[in-house]
Image (cartoon, rainbow, N blue to C red):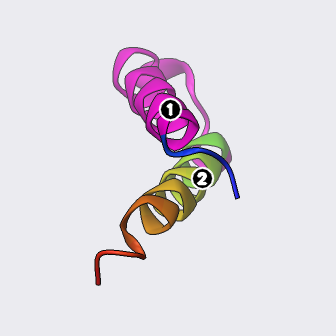
Amino acid sequence: MRKKWMNYLVTTLLVFLIIFDFNNLSTITITCMAIAIAFNLYDLFKDKF
């Protein structure tokens, strides 16, 4: 399991990539990034629920 700050960093980078480069990304790339964000958020919040 990665450290919590690493999950925050990766999630933030993926969100900024999707926001600022949305027109140049393919649908498959956006889907893969969304899956990666979902896994990172799951790792961050699985202990709270």
Q: Name the amino acid type tagged 1.
A: Leu
Element class at badge 2: helix
| Residue 42 placement (x, y as % from top left) | 46, 68
* Residue drawn at x 49%, y 24% as measured from the top left: 13
* Residue drawn at x 57%, y 54% as measured from the top left: 31
For label 1, the crowd category at 10 Å Cα-Cα, with few meaning under 14, some 14 to 19 and many 20 or more, is some
Is 21 one of the magenta-colored residues?
Answer: yes
Is 14 one of the magenta-colored residues?
Answer: yes
| Residue 16 placement (x, y as % from top left) | 39, 22
**CA separation, marks 1 and 2?**
8 Å
Residue 6 vertical placement versus 3 (above, below): above
Q: Name the amino acid type tagged 2.
A: Ala
Element class at badge 1: helix
Residue at the extreme top of the image, as rendered: 20
> Position of 33 compared to 13: left or right?
right
- Residue nearest the viewer, comparing 1 with 23: 1
Residue 10 vertical placement versus 3 (above, below): above
- Residue nearest the viewer, comparing 35 with 1: 1
| Residue 25 placement (x, y as % from top left) | 57, 28
Residue at the extreme left of the image, as rendered: 49
- Residue nearest the viewer, comparing 39 with 22: 39
Residue bearing mark 1: 14
Region of the chain picked out in magenta, as a range: 5-28
| Residue 22 placement (x, y as % from top left) | 42, 26
**Residue 46 figure quarter:** bottom left
* Residue drawn at x 41%, y 30% as measured from the top left: 12
Are discs 1 and 2 less than 8 Å apart at CB?
yes
Residue bearing mark 2: 36
